[in-house]
Image (cartoon, rainbow, N blue to C red):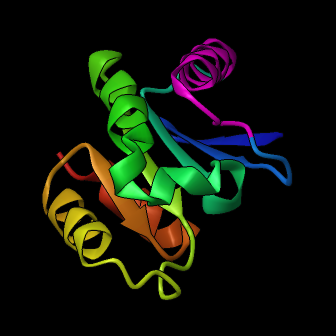
Amino acid sequence: MNIKAINDISIVNSNEIIIKDTQTAIDFIMSVKYETNCSKIAINKGAIIEDFFILSKGIAGEILQKFINYQIKFAIIGDYSKYTSKPLKDFIYESNKGKDIFFVSSEKEAIEMLSKE
């Protein structure tokens, strides 16, 4: 896991799956917050278990609720074009209209979205 901090934003890149369930999400939040003292985190999509993107499994809601509970703004960086699920596309669209959870295509976009107040 590679972490770099830009202002109050931690950018995390990992070749391994880091977030698998709610407990690993909490461990991730606490580790990054302790290491960088940042309240905004962006991570590459490949570091999150693929089942996260199957909304019917409920994993996304459980994990994202932890970020909300710990007051962490969160962006997931990746390509979402392969997903055909309308509920997922709607979820991504609605999340990106909010101010806490974002699904973005680049590190630059993650920084832009996480920097908004």
**Residue 68 placement: quadrant:** top left
Q: State whether residue 33 is above or below residue 81.
A: above
103 to the left or right of 52: left
Where is residue 84 drawn, in percent x and y?
A: 39, 85
- Image coordinates of residue 10 in percent, x first then y, are 58, 39
| x then y, percent, for residue 101 | 31, 48
Seen from this angle, which residue lies furthest front? 56
Give the percent coordinates (x, y) of residue 71.
30, 22
Q: Residue at x 64, y 36 (%)?
A: 19
Report the number of numbered marks.
Answer: 0
Name the residue located 57 percent from the left edge and 29 percent from the top edge: 21
Magenta residues, as a range?
Answer: 18-35
User: Which residue: 56% across, 66% down?
Assistant: 107
In this rendering, the answer to whether 59 lies above or below 72 is below
Locate the N terminus and report the quarter of the image it occupies: top right
63, 72: nearer the viewer: 63
Residue 39 inside the magenta-drawn segment: no
Quadrant (top left/top right/bottom left/bottom right) for the C terminus: top left
Up the image or down, 78 lies above or below 81; here it is: above
Q: Is residue 113 left or right of residue 106?
A: left
> 109 or 79: nearer the eye?
79
Above or below residue 56? Residue 32 is above
**Prevailing SS of the magenta stretch:** helix
